[in-house]
Image: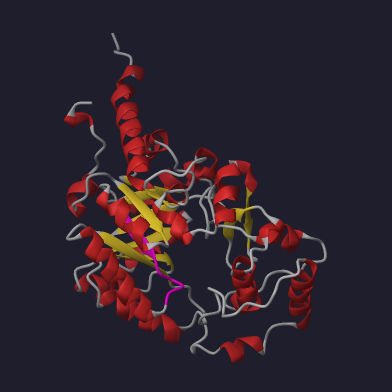
C-alpha cells in the first residue's frame, strides 16, 4: 500500500504517534507494546497504590523511550474522605453480607490469603490525592480521567505539560468536561467494556462531536476492526480508544487468568452483560455464574461504590486465587466477538491499520459524479 494511504488523523501529528489508535490496558507490557506499535498506550492505574503507579509508569517509560503514553484514573465524586475499610464495613447491610456468604458456601470458595484488588484500599479522597500526585510527578505524557474530570487536577496536569483527556458517555457531559479544560474527549458508547453508559456508539458519537467543537473526539465502544476505525473517522472523530482488543494479546496473558482467556475466546458479542455487582458502577463483563448470581430474584441490589467494593472485593480475589471456574470473569466490551485467538499486540495493530487504510481508500467508490 502506498505510504500516502496509511491511516492518519490530525491527532497523530499533535501527539507524535503513527496511528490514531489509543489502547487502554491494566498491564505494563501491553501498554508499552501498544505505544511501540505506533499507537498510544494508556495504563489503567485506578486500583494501584501510589508507589506502584510511580514504579509502573517508570517501567513503561523504560520500555518505550521517548514515545508518548498515558495513564487513566477513575475519579468519581462522592467518595469517602479517608482510606478506612472499617468505616465502610460498618455500613454494609446484613442482607448483603448473607448473600455473599451464600455464594461462598454454594461455590465452596476458600478464604482469600490477602485482600482482593478492590479491597487493597478504599476508593477515597485520601488515596485519590496520593495517586494524582504520583501521576503528576511522573514523566507520563497524558492524564486520562475515566470517571470525573476535576478542574483543579486538569489544570495542574496541563501546567505540568501533560495532555488531558476525559471519557464521557452522554452529550450532557461535554460542557462540563470542556469547562474543566480537558483537551480530548472519548465518546464511550454502550458497547464498551467495564464502566459504560446507556447510549449506543453510533447514536452517541456524532452528538458528542457536534457538541465538542474544536476539541478532538475519540470513539470507544464496539471498536474491533479497521472498518470500525473508518466508521469512527466518518462520524467526525479523530481516532479510537480500544480496550477489549488487547485482552487476548500475547503481552496481556501474564495479567490474565487462563480461565478468562478461554472464556474470552469463546465469547460472542451477545455473551456480555452490564452489572453493578463488580464495584457499584455499571460494568460490562463476560456473562458467567458471577453475573447470573447477582441477576437472580433473591439477589440484593448492588451497593454504591465503594461499599460494593468492600462487600465483594476479597471474594473476587479468592475466586481467581483458588480457580473457582464458574465465577471467574473479565470485563469486556461487545467487540469481544471479533477476537478469538491470542496474538501479539503488533499483529493486532497492523491488522487494524491495514484494514482501516484500505477501507478509507476505497470509500471514493461510493461517490457518483453528478452530471
Is residue 43 found inside the magenta-colored segment of the image?
A: yes
Residue 8 spot, x, y in % from top left: 24, 39
The residue most toward the right is 298
- Colour scheme in the image? secondary structure
Residue located 33% across and 14% down the image: 368
The answer to whether one can see residue 163 in this image is: no
The answer to whether one can see residue 272 in this image is: yes
Residue located 25% across and 78% down the image: 137
The residue most toward the top is 371
Pick the front one: 244 or 217 = 244
52 lies above or below 320: below
Residue located 64% across and 46% down the image: 271
Residue 286 spot, x, y in % from top left: 61, 52
10 lies above or below 70: above
Q: How many marks?
A: 0
> Which quadrant of the figure contains the C terminus?
top left
Residue located 42% across and 43% down the image: 343
263 lies above or below 91: above
User: Is residue 109 rendered to the left or right of residue 18?
Assistant: right
Pick the front one: 227 or 185 = 227
**Image quadrant where residue 310 sits:** bottom right
> Which quadrant of the figure contains the N terminus?
top left
Residue 110 spot, x, y in % from top left: 70, 74
Is residue 93 found inside the magenta-colored segment of the image?
A: no
Magenta stretch, residue numbers: 41-48
Residue 351 spot, x, y in % from top left: 36, 36
Amino acid at each position: 500500500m502506498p505510504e500516502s494511504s496509511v491511516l492518519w488523523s490530525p491527532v497523530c501529528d499533535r501527539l507524535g504517534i503513527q496511528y490514531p489508535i489509543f489502547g487502554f490496558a491494566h498491564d505494563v507490557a501491553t501498554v508499552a507494546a501498544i505505544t511501540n506499535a505506533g499507537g498510544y498506550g494508556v495504563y489503567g492505574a485506578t486500583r494501584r497504590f501510589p508507589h506502584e503507579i510511580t514504579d509502573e509508569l517508570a517501567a513503561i517509560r523504560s520500555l518505550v523511550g521517548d514515545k508518548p503514553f498515558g495513564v487513566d484514573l477513575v475519579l468519581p465524586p462522592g467518595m469517602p474522605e479517608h482510606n478506612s475499610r472499617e468505616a465502610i464495613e460498618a455500613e454494609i447491610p446484613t442482607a448483603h453480607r448473607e448473600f455473599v456468604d451464600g455464594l461462598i458456601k454454594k461455590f465452596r470458595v476458600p478464604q482469600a490469603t490477602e485482600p482482593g484488588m478492590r479491597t487493597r484500599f478504599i476508593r477515597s479522597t485520601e488515596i485519590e490525592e496520593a495517586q494524582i500526585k504520583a501521576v503528576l510527578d511522573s514523566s507520563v505524557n497524558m492524564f486520562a480521567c475515566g470517571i470525573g474530570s476535576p478542574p483543579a487536577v486538569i489544570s495542574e496536569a496541563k501546567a505540568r505539560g501533560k495532555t488531558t483527556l476525559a471519557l464521557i458517555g452522554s452529550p450532557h457531559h461535554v460542557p462540563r468536561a470542556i469547562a474543566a479544560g480537558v483537551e480530548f474527549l472519548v465518546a464511550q458508547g454502550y458497547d464498551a467494556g467495564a464502566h459504560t453508559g446507556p447510549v449506543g456508539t453510533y447514536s452517541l458519537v456524532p452528538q458528542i462531536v457536534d457538541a465538542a467543537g474544536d476539541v478532538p473526539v475519540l470513539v470507544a465502544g464496539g471498536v474491533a476492526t479497521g472498518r470500525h476505525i473508518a466508521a469512527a473517522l466518518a462520524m467526525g472523530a479523530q481516532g479510537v480508544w480500544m480496550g477489549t482488543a488487547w485482552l487476548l494479546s500475547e503481552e496481556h496473558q501474564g495479567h490474565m487468568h487462563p480461565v478468562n482467556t478461554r472464556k474470552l475466546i469463546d465469547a460472542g458479542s451477545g455473551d456480555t452483560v452490564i452489572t453493578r455487582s463488580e464495584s457499584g458502577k455499571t460494568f460490562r463483563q463476560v456473562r458467567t455464574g458471577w453475573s447470573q448470581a447477582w441477576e437472580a430474584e433473591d439477589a440484593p441490589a448492588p451497593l454504591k461504590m465503594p461499599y460494593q467494593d468492600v462487600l465483594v472485593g476479597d471474594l473476587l480475589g479468592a475466586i481467581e486465587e483458588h480457580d473457582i471456574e464458574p465465577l471467574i470473569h473479565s470485563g469486556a466490551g461487545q467487540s469481544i466477538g471479533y477476537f478469538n485467538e491470542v496474538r501479539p499486540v503488533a499483529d493486532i495493530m497492523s491488522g487494524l491499520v491495514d484494514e482501516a487504510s484500505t477501507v478509507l481508500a476505497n470509500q471514493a467508490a461510493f461517490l457518483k459524479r453528478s452530471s
